[in-house]
Image (tube, rainbow, N blue to C red):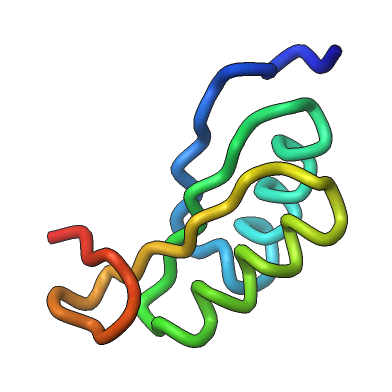
Amino acid sequence: MGKLDGKVAFITGAARGQGRSHAVRLAQEGADIAPSSRSTPASRTSGNTTQQLSGAACQGVSAAPGAEGTPAVG
């Protein structure tokens, strides 16, 4: 059982760099992840990668309102 079981982490800038590493680490601790990015494909890729590495539930979120196929935050 991880420290963050049952928690959800909304990670901004999760497509690369520190955001991506934080998403993976939090997922490894048991959190479900909502990665966000300005790019819908990058957000999806980040969510898929995080899910594959950790097994956590992930739903990519785009910061671009109305981006097709991904829930928008705005």
Residue 18, x across and y down, in percent: 67, 58
Please identify the quadrant where the N terminus is shown: top right
In the figure, is residue 15 to the left or right of 27?
A: left
Count of number-bearing discs: 0
Residue 5, x across and y down, in percent: 68, 17
Please identify the quadrant where the C terminus is shown: bottom left
Along the line of sight, the residue nearer the viewer: 59 or 38: 59
In the figure, is residue 23 to the left or right of 38?
A: right
In the figure, is residue 70 to the left or right of 51?
A: left
Residue at position x 65%, y 30% in the image: 31
Residue 33, x across and y down, in percent: 57, 44
Q: Does 39 sit above or below residue 32?
A: below
Residue at position x 59%, y 17% in the image: 6
Where is residue 28, by image quadrant? top right
Where is residue 66, by image quadrant? bottom left
Residue 15, x across and y down, in percent: 59, 72
Q: Does 41 sit above or below residue 22?
A: below
Q: Does 38 sit above or below residue 31?
A: below
Residue at position x 78%, y 41% in the image: 25
Where is residue 12, by image quadrant? bottom left
Q: Does 72 sit above or below residue 29?
A: below
Residue at position x 66%, y 49% in the image: 23
